[in-house]
Amino acid sequence: MANREFPVAGEHRYDRSSPVRWILSHALRYPWLPLAAIAASISANALTSYSRVLVGDAFRVVTTPGGTLQGLLSVAVLVGAARAGQALLQLARNVAVEFLAQRIERDTRDEFYISLLGKSLSFHSRQRVGDLMARATNDVHQINLMVNPGANLIFDSLVGTVVPIIAIASIRLQLVAVPLLFVALLAVTLRDYTSKLNPVSDAMRQQFGIMNAGLAESIAGIEVVKAYAQEKQEQQKFEREARRFRDHFVAQGEIRARYLPFLVYAFATAGALLHALLLHFSDPTFDVGNIISFMGLVALLRFPTFLSLFSFNLVQLGISGAQRILELITTGSEMDENADGLHKRMVGEVEFQNVTFGYDDNEPVLRDISFRARPGETVAIVGGTGSGKTTLTRLINRVYDVDSGRVLVDGIDVRDWSLESLRSQISTIEQDVFLFSRPIGENIAFGTGMRAEQEAIEYSAREAQAHGFIESLPEGYDTSIGERGVTLSGGQRQRIAIARAFLTDPRILILDDSTSAIDSATEDAIQKAMYRVRQGRTTFLITHRLSQIRWADRILVLRSGVLEDQGTHEELVQRSPTYRRIFALAEPETAPMAGDGTADDGRRG
């Protein structure tokens, strides 16, 4: 199994060697459902064929001298019983297959979601959210439709072809010649049909994902679209992608319009009637009743011919969807959870030993970084844009793994820690805060797995200077916020994020420009709260505000991914030209006006 960051205890293992085997392994998790469906399908088709034979018997009773009403009624009762039994068995088959389809959809969606949770940040940074959503919703549901009605009808068609031919053979063995020829021609034409349909179905699923991804991206960036008045451009872009999807759909329709099995069936019906009539005139024992039974059974072959038109298409769309889902599930992650790794309470010592790191195969972002942060120490990280400040902090909680060198926490390589234990004791507050579309209280308690008491939530909010504005909201801590917290100001979002980090009681705290969107008065109050809560915590601080840099125990100066110098503010002012330049640029900086709560310098390391 591929590496992943989020394992699930007792997880069911599926065969992922191919899309078809993967789907079958899901179906075989509930073996009694497909077995019940198979038994019901065979029995229902047997009763259907028997009823057609009985119709011939009824015709023979009517046309034979001496036939009685009682004999006709007996046949009619048998026909009615056979059709009633067929209806009940078909209902049982459909119920069993529908249960199976729904369970497979549920299980595949769970498997896909768990797989996404286990992927690394590097993986997610390469994906388009809209395409992931298309796979998690439309492609997964397509597997449901593939099972029912797709595979359900295909199997029923197969049984509905074999059973009538067996019944025909029981009437007169010579009669199977035309039906068998029809089956052979049907197989050839279906193979040609599916070979043309498969690539179009694959292209449809791919294009749907592209179209959905573009739509999601435009909606997520609607503020930028409207700010630059580019609604027309986005409309044209979406129409272009929708037109491509339409073209694939039209191509699929053209293939279905040239569906040859209908023509094959028409010739087979004519050939079967001609064969039956020739037998009748050459052999008087082959009476009209036999002809009626025979043609009734041949008529049953029209059902699989008709259903093949769309059932094979549903199956192919399901396989295409399964292929797209498996493509992501089987994509390996750069790191795994390391469940057997170290689980213990951190002290908070962090050490970098000759660390070099780069994204993918690009030029290193960090080169030969070495420093040591003692427990409870506050370390400020400064440098120009793109110097690697944020990247450095993401190596501490193993968002990324180093290319060379080591990152140690409490003297132990972070790769030897259990990922859950490591990350649960490190909290990060970034400039771009993400809040869920949930009540504010749940957002604050998110880092604890929603297991925090209300008193603890409110205490953390007070420490982050958020309690006041939360209480002023209509429903207080139960107030639901919009997606990503769009109903709150930038400063309010930052304070909720700080409260969320406080509540987890982290041993290591990373603040990445976390007060950039907070007004001066609120910032001063938060700085006091931070000073109280950071005691006993190792804090890494990325900021351009001198008021925060100055109270750091140590300052790291990064330049183009290299640790140029480190020391206290006073030491660096004396000996570091880079730090003096940063200091000179920041000193004339005017603080945001108190009360606006929306300032944002927008700079990231």
Image (cartoon, helix red, strand yellow):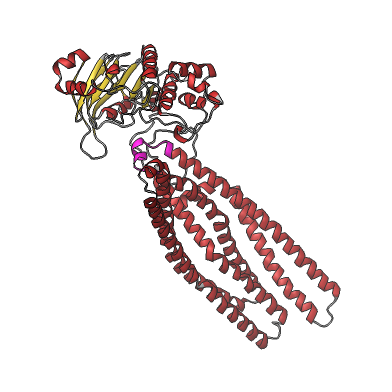
Residue 124 is inside the magenta segment: yes
Q: Is residue 28 visible?
A: no
Residue 286 among those drawn in magenta: no
Taking the spot 50% from the left edge, 61% from the top edge, the residue there is: 313
User: Splitting the image into 4 quarters, where does residue 478 fall?
Assistant: top right
411 vs 160: above or below? above
> Quick check: 26 left or right of 326?
right
Measured as percent of width and height from the top left, residue 508 is found at 35, 19
In the image, residue 156 lies at what x, y percent? Answer: 59, 61
Query: Residue at coordinates 77% horizontally, 66% vertically from top-left?
Result: 78
Q: 583 or 75, which lies in front?
A: 583
- Furthest-bottom residue in this view: 281
Q: Return the x and y of residue 341 as percentages of the image width and height.
A: 37, 25
Q: Establish if 173 lies above or below 129.
A: below
Image coordinates of residue 190 in percent, x first then y, are 49, 68
Image quarter of residue 347: top left
Q: Is residue 210 visible?
A: yes
Figure check: 95 above or below 83: above
Give the side of residue 546 with respect to residue 507, left or right. Answer: left
Report the side of 366 relative to 180 (left or right): left
The total of numbered circles placed on residues is 0
Name the residue located 26 percent from the left edge and 18 percent from the top edge: 546
Residue range of the region highlighted in magenta in the rendering: 116-128
Q: Residue at x 50, y 58 (%)?
A: 315
- Which of the pair 225/23 is nearer the observer? 225
Which quarter of the rendered picture does the C terminus lie within?
top left
